[in-house]
Image (cartoon, rainbow, N blue to C red):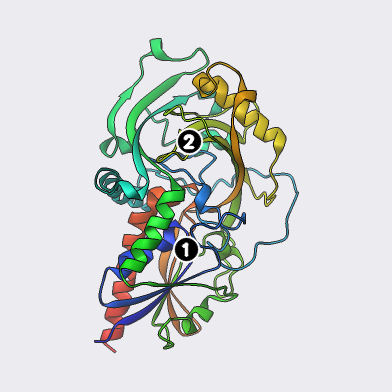
Amino acid sequence: MPQTNVVVLGAGVIGLTTALLLSRDERYSVTVIAKHMPGDYDSVEYASPWYDPLHPPRRHAESWTDPYHDGLGQAPALSLQPTQPIPNKSNSVGAEGTPAQQYERDTGPILFRLCREVPESGIVFNQCTIYNRHKDASTPIGQWFAAAVSPSPWFTSIVEDFRVLPRSELPADVDSASTFRTVCINTAVYLPWLLGQCLAHGAVVRRGTVAHVAEAGALHHSGNRTDIIVNCVGLGARALGGVKDGLVYPARGQTVLVRQEPMQMTTVSGTDDGPEEVVYTMTRAGGGGTILGGCLQANNWNAQVDLNLANRIMKRCVALVPKLTDGKGYEALDVVKHNVGMRPLREGGPRVDVDTVNGFRVVHQYGHGGGGYQMSWGSAKEAVRLVNQLRGERSRL
């Protein structure tokens, strides 16, 4: 049987990981089509470079994941409407018994192996401490945090050296805490590495845009008809023709990248500055500085930096980790960049399934919310299983 022509829409972490797994299989000829690529930093549409993932699941604010259209199409008109609560049916990253949890279980060991064996991927080990305040439980941030602050979280089988901190080690306003060794990804290194791996395995990557998912049927690099389309368009699933998924919505996040590197990863389940704000620090690999965050603002499309929020973020992070500025206050932070991104949340969790659109077989794979990196390999594994299933159907025709 000849090779099966596959077009992957989107070059965020979900699209590239899936393209890599497919390109490793000689049965497939893979084309990736995306408006934005790793190395692009000029658009809020392409937020993947600004997400600094920490495995395991962190259901908190600043998870910079697949952007609007995941690099395809145009963002909607800028809305300055007040933010809205996270819908009750929003996806729960890592919630017990969900597909998202299985995707994370499948992804964790791969990220740990890459950390140990492939240093050029930009993944390092770090010690993470998560502080929990009971009063945050009913807030959007607290609900997003639920899996991470559980006294017996499921991810203890993935991370290393997990332990619950004794009360004697807790700050005055904290009710419980845990610490463990996990991995942290410098996305500015990891995304180009993924792209390079795709190219090394024969995938062809091209810039392009589509208004309808079926347009990918004519975009395979061979010039022949596409056999299977893999739709990794992230937030773009709201508007992409042939999809238009009304369950997908944005959750705005904002972070500050600073040059200080305290080599410390710390987060708290909420703040006293509002139900949509959170505090955390993550030092990245390879001299990548430290990300300070953050917020979780549902249905807010504002791409502009909120400087008042940025100041609150910096103040909270310095209070949490004083060695960021050696006790000199937040004014001593050496700011590299303020970042804004839109997470592609989806009520009910990620969509990974099979569809037929205008005669083309499509594997939909989007809606990973704030967990795109930590679900990437597991989600890609499931998408590839579905592609294999469709290929088997074609071989029987």
Mark 1 highlights which residue? 11
Residue type indicated by callout 2: Phe
The x, y position of residue 322, in whole percent, is 52, 19
| Quadrant in which the N terminus appears | bottom left
Q: Determine the image quadrant of residue 148.
A: top left
| Element type at mark 2 | loop
Which of discs 1 and 2 lies nearer the camera? The answer is: 1
Residue nearest the observer in this picture, 243 or 381: 381
The reply, left or right, for residue 61 in relation to residue 83 is: left
For this rendering, which residue is in front, 38 or 241? 38
Residue at the outermost right position: 80
In the image shown, does 329 or 274 lie closer to the viewer? 329
Q: Tag 2 or tag 1, which sits nearer the N-term? A: 1
Q: Residue at x 73, y 56 (%)?
A: 78
Residue 342 in sight from this viewpoint: yes
Can see residue 90? Answer: no
| Helix, strand or loop at mark 1 | loop
Q: Are marks 1 and 2 in contact (CB under 8 Å)?
A: no
Q: Amino acid at mark 1?
A: Ala
Q: Residue at x 60, y 68 (%)?
A: 73
Task: In the rendered view, tell whether residue 163 sits above or below residue 171.
Answer: below
Residue 272 tag number? none
**Residue 24 position in % (x across, y down):** 27, 68
x and y percent of residue 54 in the render? 41, 40
Provide the residue designation for mark 2: 145
Please tell me how crowded label 2 is: few (under 14), some (14-19), or many (20+) other residues with Cα within 10 Å.
many
Measured in 3D between alpha carbons, the distance from the residue under mark 1 to the one under mark 2, in whole angstroms, is: 28 Å
- Which residue is found at the position 32% from the left and 67% from the top? 200
At label 1, counting other C-alpha atoms closer than 10 Å, the crowd grade (few under 14, some 14-19, many 20 or more) is many
Q: Quadrant of the C terminus?
A: bottom left
